[in-house]
């Protein structure tokens, strides 16, 4: 494949995704499908459906070249064409778990090698999948490695058969373009009032007459009780309205219920892999790693609590959120069950 061909395809895909859009009136019909449909992504999905096209443009990052026996030394900064191929692969979103047709052509060991190499995480990379130059630019080959590791573990556990996974991990270009996210329809004001005023299980919703047969409760006392309950309903309506308003103002749309997948090595394997007896030069990748991982499925519930608008044109709001996470694998996993709080950030890519 010529370098010019990859650059042309990359620029064309980026342009089509940049101009992708869905109907303004389009709403989410299924909870697990959080993205709209677009003619541009439909065209791209049809173009990349052939295995020859995927192999030509989605599998030419350093990771794939190394797996095929090509590249042996890391480059700093990374090669532009390899970064383009990795980004196309990530935006395509359906991981290519093999670089050939044989069982030995698995990408998982090479992806693990990159993900668990501590040399990849420095102050300049902000301890994440960014370039090692402090620019906050995304290192798409690191993102590609993470995607491959997650996909292999999802497949290993048989989670890919569930729609909440397959709607993303088996669907090309799913939600890979700006403003593709479709929020779940918000609670309307009338619905909030109805929910706040719903009757109790044993009452009729008014409750002023619940004590009519009690001689110790006078008329004035019943009025106070009824007034207190009415105030409670108003407070619930007000809180619901405030919550809905924060959701509407949140540019990141972080509120909601999220499913999180966490994979990790046994600590002994992780330590021995990164601190071997014989040192490895910085420009040489660590050996392929295929020891197996543990995987946790974690449910997260997040709500926006406050939005701050800093001074300065073009500055994005600071959104504060809180919530909790719970393990779906077992309550014994204390690391998965925790309270959450933080603020999301936006980076250049």
Image (cartoon, rainbow, N blue to C red):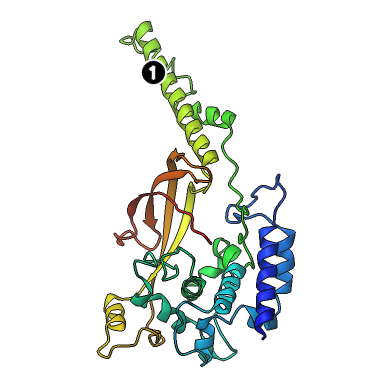
Q: Report the label total.
A: 1
> Of residues 24 and 310, which is closer to you in this image?
310
Q: Position of residue 179 (x, y in %)?
A: 62, 52
- On screen, residue 286 versus residue 93, left or right, reads left
Q: Position of residue 105 (x, y in %)?
A: 53, 89
Q: Is residue 95 visible?
A: no
Q: Considering only vertical position in the picture, is 189 above or below 86?
A: above
Q: For label 1, count other residues whose C-alpha is less than 10 Å away and answer few (under 14), some (14-19) or many (20+).
A: few
The residue wearing badge 1 is 228
| Residue sticking out furthest to the left | 277
Q: Considering only vertical position in the picture, is 28 above or below 331?
A: above
Q: Is residue 239 visible?
A: yes
Q: Secondary structure at mark 1?
A: helix
Q: Position of residue 275 (x, y in %)?
A: 27, 82
The picture quadrant where one finds residue 125 is bottom left
Residue located at (42% from left, 69% from top):
133
State the quadrant of the N terminus: bottom right
| Residue sticking out furthest to the front | 312
Residue located at (50% from left, 26% from top):
197
> Of residues 291 and 128, which is closer to you in this image?
128
The picture quadrant where one finds residue 326 is bottom left
Q: Position of residue 232 (x, y in %)?
A: 41, 24
Residue located at (45% from left, 64% from top):
135
């Amino acid at each position: 494949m010529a370098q010019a061909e990859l650059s042309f395809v990359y620029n064309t895909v980026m342009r089509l995704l940049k101009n992708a859009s869905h109907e303004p009136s389009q709403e989410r019909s299924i909870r697990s499908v959080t993205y709209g449909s677009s003619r541009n992504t439909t065209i791209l999905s049809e173009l990349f459906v052939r295995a020859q096209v995927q192999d030509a443009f989605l599998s030419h990052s350093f990771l794939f070249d190394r797996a095929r026996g090509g590249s042996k030394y890391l480059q700093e900064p990374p090669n532009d064409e390899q970064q383009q191929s990795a980004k196309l692969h990530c935006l395509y979103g359906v991981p290519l778990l093999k670089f050939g047709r044989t069982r030995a052509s698995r990408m998982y060991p090479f992806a693990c090698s990159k993900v668990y190499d501590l040399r990849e995480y420095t102050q300049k990379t902000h301890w994440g999948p960014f370039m090692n130059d402090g620019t906050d630019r995304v290192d798409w080959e690191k993102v590609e490695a993470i995607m491959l590791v997650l996909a292999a573990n999802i497949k290993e556990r048989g989670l890919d058969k569930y729609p909440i996974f397959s709607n993303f991990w088996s669907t090309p270009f799913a939600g890979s373009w700006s403003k593709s996210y479709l929020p779940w329809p918000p609670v309307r004001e009338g619905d909030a009032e109805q929910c706040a005023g719903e009757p109790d299980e044993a009452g009729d919703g008014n409750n002023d007459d619940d004590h009519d047969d009690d001689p110790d409760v006078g008329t004035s006392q019943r009025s106070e009780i009824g007034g207190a309950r009415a105030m409670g309903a108003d407070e619930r309506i007000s809180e619901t309205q405030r919550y809905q308003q924060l959701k509407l103002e949140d540019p990141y749309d972080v509120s909601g219920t999220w499913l999180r997948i966490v994979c990790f090595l046994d600590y002994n394997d992780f330590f021995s892999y990164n601190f071997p007896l014989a040192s490895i030069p910085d420009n040489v990748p660590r050996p392929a790693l295929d020891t197996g991982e543990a995987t946790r499925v974690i449910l997260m519930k997040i709500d926006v609590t406050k939005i701050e608008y800093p001074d300065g044109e073009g500055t994005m709001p600071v959104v504060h959120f809180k919530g909790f996470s719970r393990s779906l694998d077992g309550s014994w996993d204390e690391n998965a069950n925790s309270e959450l709080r933080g603020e999301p950030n936006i980076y250049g890519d």
